[in-house]
Amino acid sequence: MRNFLIKRLLLSILIFFFVVFIIYLLMRCMPMSYVETMAQQLSQAPGSKPYEEWLLQLNAQYGLDKGIIPGFFDQLKNLLTGNFGDSWKFTVPVVQKFNEVIWVSFTMGGIAFILELLIAIPLGVIAATKQYSRTDYAVTVFALAGISLPTFFFATLLKLVFSVQLGWFDLVGLIGRDYNHLDAWGQFLDKAHHLVLPIVTLVVISVGSLMRYTRTNMLEVLNSDYIRTARAKGLSEKRVIYHHAFRNTLIPLVTIVGGSLPGLFAGALITETLYAIPGIGWTSYQAMTAGDIPFSMFYLSFLAILTLAGNLLADILYAVVDPRVRIA
Amino acid sequence: MAKTEKKTGNLTIDNTFTPVTYDPQYILMVNKLKKYFPIKGGMVSQTVGYVRAVDGITFNLKRGTTMGLVGESGCGKTTAGRTILRLSGGKTGGQVLFNGQEVYDLSHKELRALRTKMQIIFQDPFSSLSPRLPVGEIIGEAVREHHLVPKEEFNDYIDQVMDNCGLQPFHKARYPHEFSGGQRQRICIARALALNPEFVVCDEPVSALDVSIQAQIINLLKELQEKYQLTYLFISHDLSVVEHISDTVGVMYLGNLVEYGATEDIFRNPLHPYTKALFSAIPIPDPTVKMDRIVLEGSIPSPANPPSGCKFHTRCANCMERCKVEAPEQKEIEPGHYVVCHLYDK
C-alpha cells in the first residue's frame, strides 16, 4: 500500500507539470490579450504615446516579452514558491479574489451534489429493481430529459417561468437590492432564496447520468449468480437488494463520486454566468475572456491538483470497499 | 413474476393436466411442469412467441434418493431445476408438489420459510458467491435470518457445518476469491446444507471443476446424503458421474423428459432412441474396445419453434409417419421405467 501511494504520488506530480505547461501554452496562444486591450485604451487618451510604444512597455511590465518556454518556467517558479501574484483584471491578489468567490460556488455545488446523490441513487435502484415497469420508464424519461436539456436553455426556461411570470425569484444575482439593510438571518435567507434556481438547474441537468449509471450497475449486479444464491437462501427481497446487490453497486459509484468532488471547487461556469452568481465559475470566465494570465493559471492549476487528488482518493476508497483490491 | 399470457393462435399455451394426489413416499412430485420464456418483439414489445424451455415434465422423487437429470446443453435441465425451486419467476403450467405442498401456491413469506427445506448448489462456484462477503457470512447469513439455531450456538453450528464440508474454521473470515474452485464448491455446499434442507438441487455442481476435484465433491455429496438423508436432484451432462451418484435417471430432450427410470435399467437397457444415442457417446477407457457410436444427424432444433409431433422425430433413426404428427405419451415399459416414444406402443 505504501509503495502504491508513493508511485501514484510521483506520477501525479509528473502529470501536474505537463498540465501546467499546457495551461500556460493555451493562455499565451489565446486571441484575447489583456496587454493589447490595455494598450489600446491607453493610447486613445489625449496626448498619449502611440499604441506600439504602449504595447512594448506593457509587455515588458507584465512579463510577456519573453518566449513561451522561459515564461512558463517563471510562472512555474511563482506557483511552486506560493507567489501567485495579482490578478490583472481584478487588480487584487489572486488568492484574495479566489477566496472571495470560491465559497459561493462551493456551497452551491455542494448542495446540488448532495441533492443529486439523494435523488439519483434511490431512483436508479428503484428503476433497476422494477426494470421495464412504468416506474422505470418514467424515471428514464425524466433522466434523459435532464441529460438532453442544454444548461442555458433550461436555465432560461426556469427564469421565464419562475422569475418573469410567477415572480418568485430575482432574475439574476446572489443578493437582493435591500441586502445591506437585513440582519444576519435575513441575509442568509436572501442568499438561499437567490440560489434556489441555480441549484435546481444544476441538479436537473446532472441527476440523469448518475441515475442511469446507478441503474445500469444495479441491473448488472441483480442479474448475477450470487443474487440468485441470495434469493435461494430465502432472504427477504429487501435484504437481497440492499444488503447484497446495493453493496456491490457502490463500488463503481464511489469512482464516479470521487471523480466529481473536484467539480465542487470548479464552479459551474455556464450556470453561474447565466444567473450572474459571483462564484468561481463566473469569475474565471471573466478572467479568461480578459486574458488574465495569473488568475487563470492559479484557477486551472488548482483544478488540476483537485482532479489528481480526487482520482487518488477514489483509488484508496476502492481498496476500502472492495476486499479484492485490499490484498493486491 | 412473469404473467402467463393466454392468447389465441400460435401463442396458445396448452395447460391441461390431471392433478396428482400426494403420495407421502415422494418428497417431490412434478406433474406436467412447463416453463416458457416469452420472446418480446415488435414496436410495443408484445409477446411474439415462447421459448419452451421446460415443456411438460413429469416425475416423482423418493425421499433420500438421488435423481440424475441428463441431456445435452440447452435442453432445459437447469431451467427445470430452477423452476422446481421457484427461482425463475412463475411457472407456465403443471404442478410442483414439495411434501404435498404446491410450491407456486405459497405466499412470498411462506416460500422464504420453505427455502430452508429446499436448496440449490449452482454450477459455477466462482460467480455464485458474493465477492463482498466473508465466507462465514455467506454460510451463516441465512441461518441467522431464519433463526435456525440459538444465538449462542451460532458460531459452533457454522464451524460444524464447515467441518462437515471439509472447511477449516479460520476460513470464515476469508473472502471467496481467496479459495480454489474445489474449496469454493465446498463453500456452496456448506451454504446450502447450513439451512438443514431435505431436498437439494445440484445444478451441474462439478462441471466447472477438474476431474480430481470432481471426485472429491461427488464423494462429499454422497457422504452428506447418507448422514442427513438428503434427497438430490442431480443435474449433469456427465453420464459417468450421473451413473455413479444416481438412483434414478431422467433423460431430457428439448424440454421434455423422454425417458425416466432406475439408473441400472436405463444404463443397461436404454429404450428411447435419443437415450441410446446419448449413452453410446460415453467414452470407454479401453483403447481396444471399438465404440459403437450412434451419431445423431443435424443439430438440436430451436425450443422456440419445436418440431411437431414427437420433438425428436427430426433426428430419430426410427422415425415413423406417426411420429411427425402425434406427440407420444409417457408409458411404463418395465416397473418404474418410463419412456415417451411411439416405438413401444403395443
Image: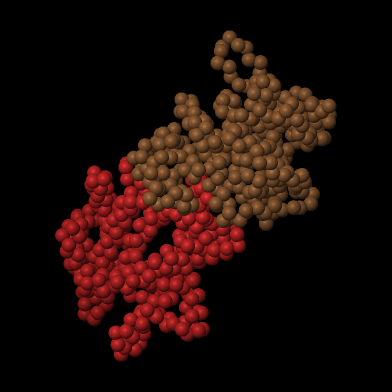
Chain colours: A red, B brown
Inspect this view and state whether residue B123 appears. no
Pinpoint residue B5: horizontal percent, then vertical percent: 71, 53
Pinpoint residue A78: horizontal percent, then vertical percent: 17, 60
Left or right: A40, with A84 as reference point: right
Q: For this rendering, which residue is in front, A195 or B126?
A: B126
Q: Is residue A190 above or below residue B143?
A: below
Residue at screen point 65% across, 38% down: B25
Q: For this rendering, which residue is in front, B97 or A189?
A: B97
Pinpoint residue A205: horizontal percent, then vertical percent: 46, 66
Question: Please, which residue is most extreme toward the top here?
Answer: B288
Total numbered labels = 0
Left or right: B87, with B183 as reference point: right
Q: Is residue A19 above or below residue A102?
A: above
Residue B169 position by quadrant: top left
Residue at screen point 35% across, 57% down: A258
Q: Quadrant of the C terminus of chain A?
A: top left
Residue at screen point 66% across, 49% down: B102
Q: Is residue A178 above or below residue B43?
A: below
Left or right: B133, with B277 as reference point: left
Residue at screen point 39% across, 41% down: B159
Q: Quadrant of the N terminus of chain A?
A: top left
Pinpoint residue A147: horizontal percent, then vertical percent: 49, 63
Inspect this view and state whether residue B165 appears. yes
Q: For this rendering, which residue is in front, B266 or B2?
A: B266
